[in-house]
Amino acid sequence: MRFTAVRALAYTIVMAAPAIAQPEIASTSMPRVEISIGADSMFAGAGRDLERTMVRLGLESASGRNHYPATYPPSLVPGVFLQVHAGTSAHTMLGVFVGADESTTLGRSPNGDSISVRTSVKTRALLASYRPAPWLRFAAGPSVIHRLLDFGNGQIVGGDTLGILAAADAKFARRPRTLTHPARFGYVTAQYRETPALDVPWMAVPLGNGPLRVVPWPTQRVRMSHWAIGLGVGFGI
C-alpha cells in the first residue's frame, strides 16, 4: 500500500477522467484572467524519511496485500488549491497559488503496535508563468510553506519557511470562450515544491495498540520537499 508516484498518477487519472473523456478544442485566444480550484495529492516528501525511521523502530510488517510502514492519502481528497492568474502580455501571467495538503504515514509491527504520523503542508506562492499555447502553462515563484508533522498526543513539529514552487498545467477546455460566456476548462497540474528539511527532536511517541506504551523517536531531519499532482477546474475571461 506504499504511496508511490505511480499510485499518485493513477489517482489523478481517475479524477481527470470526466474532464478528459469529452475534450473540446481550446479557445485560440489567451484569457486575461484565469481563476481555478482543484484537488491534488502530494508524494515523495516526508513519508520516505518517516518510513525509514519506523523500520528501524521495528514497525514493519505485512498483512495480506498491505505492507507497513506506508504513506497514503488520509482521505479521498487529500489536498485542495486555488489559483488566480492575470495576464501581463500575450504569453505571460502573474498570479497567486494557495493550497493545503495532507498525508498519513503508518507503521505497524507484527504484534500490532503502531505509530501514525500526519504530515500537513500549506503553501502560499507568487507565480510568474509563461503560456506557449492556450492549453499549456509553466509557472514558478517564491512561496511561504507551513510544514507540520503530528505524532499524536499533542506532539507537533513544524513552522513556516520560505520555498520555491514550480508547476506545469495542461488544460482540457470544456467550453471555449464566447462573447457572452467565459471559457470553462479542466486541467491537470504537476508541481514541485522545494522547502528546507524539518528538524525533529528526540521524543517519546505513544504506540497505538494496547496499554499506553511509548517508543523513543530519534532526532531526525525530515525532507519536506515534495511533488504534487492534481486536477483543477476554472474559467478565464
Image (spheres, rainbow, N blue to C red):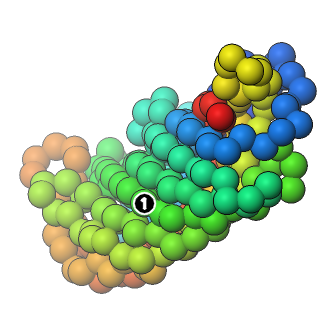
Q: Quadrant of residue 112?
A: top left
Residue 24 image point, x, y percent: 86, 22
Q: Is residue 73 above or below residue 146?
A: above
Q: Of residues 198 and 97, which is closer to you in this image?
A: 97
Measuring 16% from the left and 69% from the top, which residue is drawn there? 204
Residue 214 image point, x, y percent: 16, 62
Residue 228 image point, x, y percent: 60, 53
Relative to residue 102, is residue 228 drawn left or right? right
Q: Of residues 173 and 33, which is closer to you in this image?
A: 33
Q: Is residue 119 above or below residue 189?
A: below
Q: Of residues 170 and 67, which is closer to you in this image?
A: 170
Amino acid at circle 1: Arg
Residue 23 visible in the displayed image: yes
Relative to residue 86, is residue 179 drawn left or right? right
Q: Residue furthest front?
A: 179
Q: Which residue is mark 1?
A: 124
Q: Quadrant of the C terminus?
A: top right
Q: Quadrant of residue 20?
A: top right
Relative to residue 233, is residue 121 drawn left or right? left
